[in-house]
Image (cartoon, rainbow, N blue to C red):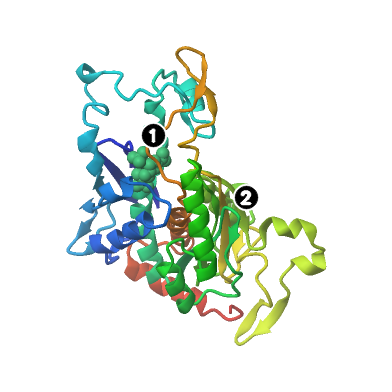
Amino acid sequence: MRFLTAGESHGQALVGILDGVPAGLCLKAEDIQKELIRRKKGYGRGDRQNIELDAVQILSGVRFGKTLGSPISLLIENKDWKNWQKIMSVKEEDQSSERKVEIPRPGHADLTGAQKYGFEDMRNVLERASARETTMRVAIGSIARIFLKECGVQIYSRVTQIGSVQDVLIEEWSEGLLEKVEASSVRMVSSDAETRAVEEIRNAGEAGDTLGGSFEVAAIGVPVGLGSYVHWDRKLDGKLAQCLMSLNAIKSVDLGIGHEVAKLRGSEAHDEIVRKDRGIGYASNRSGGIQAGMSSGEAILLRAHMKPLSTLKTPLNSVNMTTLESSPAHFERSDVCAVPSAAVIGESLVALVLAEEILKKFGGDSMEELIPRIREWKEKDKFL
Ligand code: EPS
């Protein structure tokens, strides 16, 4: 499975192509739409979310509600484009310096992107560096999610921290927990933490500042043996960390107990191997469901840590690229906090990696071919 996205934040549309989905997967635009609506939510998002509908159209690869095995292409129009048609025009004759960006924002792609590509107007950078692109990644990732559901894999997420506010620890994911998270304006389990997080976001916004945080993505029901230890580029943990690091503003990723493991002794760090009902399993899941680059059959637990957004209403110092004079950084409409959206995006990114790995291990051109192979593998003796 592979995919590409294209589109600028205020351009005409976002487009995406997902290749490698087996034939016979039931797929409706409404199912993708549901995930796109979840991505838009979250206290701390800016006005753009009220403008965009993120209405997805399936252009190819599906016939009569089922995938054909051919590339699936998707389109999402940017509603805001009508206000940017001249500024984002593809035609040479429309060239102008309207809304030109000359003062880079510390922490954003602006400066390095302009240096790399030789641009004078940093709008050429920020339009594609914008997290608007993640709309299409979620659309594509939701197809991977629908595919995974058929394979018996469920993906969840929650926000574990916003600014200084931490959510409660949880032992295990459950449907009840999921309901709480989905109902929370910041995707937290504890309503007390939610109240404090909302207040912290409000305060940051009033001060012209922004907030980051952390989120967890869990994948339940992943078969034993995805990924491999035999080559560096086949390790599942490496692939999952890369996909989460590719999300805008993510600075680090933990698996299981993550960096905490560095403080522990070996006797405290590892998951003891025990007899389970029908075979062998683990007494705990500190490793986060991956042993030596392979899925262990336990829940895969990932945490990603997001920096505060770099567009500040009360800007940091910068330098004007044209005049070379010191100046407050550029500001344009943005969000105060986007961690809840990042958690939903993280689900899609993880889904894409797991879907690809399932196809690698079990193969098949159609769902009819694939599903019995997974079932047979999961029922193998000695597995959980
Ligand atoms: C973003 C800035 C804001 C966000 C945008 C990401 O856009 P705008 O400048 O148009 O207000 O709303 O995110 C989305 C549009 C989205 O759909 O998530 C940025 O600079 O990354």
Q: Position of residue 195 (x, y in %)?
A: 50, 64
Q: Earlier in the sequence, mark 2 or mark 1?
A: 2
Q: Nearer the viewer, residue 96 or 228?
A: 96
Question: Which quadrant holds residue 371?
Answer: bottom left
Residue 16 shown left or right of residue 323 in the figure: left
Question: Which quadrant holds residue 383?
Answer: bottom right
Q: What residue lies at 47% left-to-right and 45% top-to-bottom?
A: 206
Q: Work out whether residue 28 can be spotted.
A: no
How many neighbours does mark 1 have within 10 angstroms: few (below 14), some (14-19), or many (20 or more)?
few
Q: What residue lies at 23% left-to-right and 43% top-to-bottom?
A: 79
Q: Residue furthest left?
A: 64
Q: Position of residue 327 (x, y in %)?
A: 50, 21
Check disc 1 and report the residue beneath it: 332
- Of helix, strand and loop, which one carries label 1? loop
Disc 2 residue type? His
Q: Nearer the viewer, residue 51 or 384?
A: 51
Q: Residue furthest top?
A: 323
Q: What residue lies at 50% left-to-right and 43% top-to-bottom?
A: 207
Quick check: 216 above or below 326?
below
* Label of residue 379 in the image: none
Residue 312 shown left or right of residue 123 in the figure: right
Quick check: 136 above or below 103?
below
- Distance between mark 2 and mark 1 Cα atoms: 45 Å
Q: Position of residue 234 (x, y in %)?
A: 57, 52
Q: Nearer the viewer, residue 284 or 60?
A: 284
Disc 1 residue type? Glu
* Label of residue 231 in the image: 2
Question: Which quadrant holds residue 151?
Answer: bottom left
- Of helix, strand and loop, which one carries label 2? loop
Classify mark 1 as within 8 Å of ligand 1 or not, answering yes or no. yes
Residue 328 shown left or right of residue 371 in the figure: right
Q: Position of residue 2 (x, y in %)?
A: 40, 48
